[in-house]
Image (tube, rainbow, N blue to C red):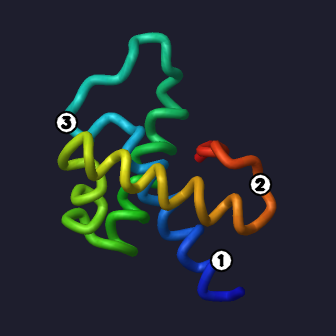
Amino acid sequence: MSDILDAESRLTDALWYGRKPGHEQPVPEDWPEDIVRGMREAMRRVEDQYGIEELQRHTESDWAWGFLSGKVSAIRWVLGEDWDMLDS
């Protein structure tokens, strides 16, 4: 069970990271500065934990992004969530 929970945590972090604009990409103008600053700090922590290359490999193609989503969905289903639960 601990391996499944660890994998779910790692994959959810990758899913969350992949949904964020890159450090050099603009964010929508209506996003509050404190939210953007917190997001960028959290992104750096995740990058330090897993490495940028590992995180980017999950989003390098539509196939990789779909594979990540499928893994998250399957692990969460095993843990009792709805089949298509992809919140991050």
What residue is pinned by disc 3? 24
For badge 2, the amino acid type reads Glu
Q: Distance between the Cα atoms at labels 1 and 3?
A: 32 Å
Q: Is residue 60 left or right of residue 18?
A: left
Q: Mark 1 vs mark 3: which is more N-terminal?
A: 1
Query: Dot 1 lies on which element?
Result: helix
Q: Which mark is residue 81?
A: 2
Q: Residue at x 75, y 67 (%)?
A: 79
Percent x, y for residue 58? 30, 56
Vertical comparison of 2 with 74: above or below:
below
Q: Which mark is residue 5?
A: 1
Closer to the camera: disc 1 or disc 3? 1
Closer to the camera: disc 2 or disc 1? 2
Percent x, y for residue 26? 27, 24
For badge 1, the amino acid type reads Leu
Q: Residues within 10 Å of mark 2 (few under 14, many from 20)?
A: few
The quarter in which the N terminus is drawn is: bottom right
Q: Which mark is residue 86?
A: none
Q: Is residue 67 left or right of residue 34?
A: left
Q: Mark 2 vs mark 3: which is more N-terminal?
A: 3
Residue sticking out furthest to the top: 30
Q: Residue at x 65, y 77 (%)?
A: 5
Q: Distance between the Cα atoms at labels 2 and 1?
A: 13 Å
